[in-house]
Image (spheres, grey):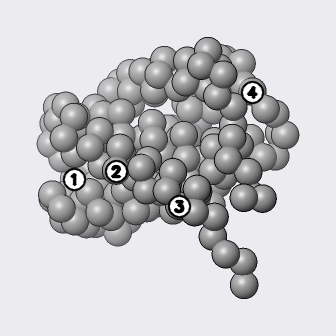
Amino acid sequence: MRKLPTRKLTAAALLIAMSIVLTRLLSLNIFPPIVRLSAGNLPIYLASFWLGPVFGGLTGFAADFIGASLTTGWFPPISLAPVLTGILPGLFVRLSRKETLPWWQLLLLVLVCDVITELFWKALALSWMVGGNFLEILTLRAPFNLLQAVGQVALLFPLLHRLGLRPKVISNRE
């Protein structure tokens, strides 16, 4: 059995805490519980890029489970969105074998991930949770999700490029 690296666990725990604070405390609830603007996915993206898709998915799940349990209550189908947000970017980086991403590729990656997870899946899960119409919820969430995705890229790009941070900073060999 392989031992989990302490550095990865510590980094994941810090990113989980950041995600909880950004999602639950520093967010803007526009149409609760349907639309919320937050930067809570930013630490999950960072976990996916730096720690890999497995730790990214675990970070997304833990942040959602702990944050929702402390505030509104946990609804399991919604948890798939942050899990996929943690898995998909890291998987793309691993499969493409790129050390850095140009801004347009990062924007495209975040937009694709957000459309799959935040827009479609969360709209479907929210329609189950509140008993609303899926298309109405999807239409209501779409412009805010686009705005949120562009804002996340505006924050991720400097972190990953201008500050010299690269995907896969923390290797598996520690």
Q: Amino acid at mark 4?
A: Thr
Question: For residue 109, what is the image quadrant?
Answer: top right
Q: Amino acid at mark 2?
A: Ala
| Residue 62 sits above or below residue 51 on the image | below
Give the mark count. Answer: 4
At horizontal 78% and vertical 46% (from top left) the residue drawn is 94
Question: In the rendering, which numbered label is found on residue 17?
Answer: 2
At horizontal 63% and vertical 50% (from top left) the residue drawn is 51
State the CA–CA distance, disc 3 to disc 1: 39 Å
Q: Which residue is mark 1?
A: 132
Q: Which residue is mark 4?
A: 100
At horizontal 44% and vertical 47% (from top left) the residue drawn is 15
At horizontal 81% and vertical 46% (from top left) the residue drawn is 95
Label pair 3/1, CB-CB below 8 angstroms: no
Q: Amino acid at mark 1?
A: Gly
State the CA–CA distance, disc 4 to disc 1: 41 Å
Q: Which residue is mark 3?
A: 9
- Judged by depth in the image, the label closer to the viewer, 2 or 1, is 2
Q: Which of marks 4 and 2 precedes in the sequence?
A: 2
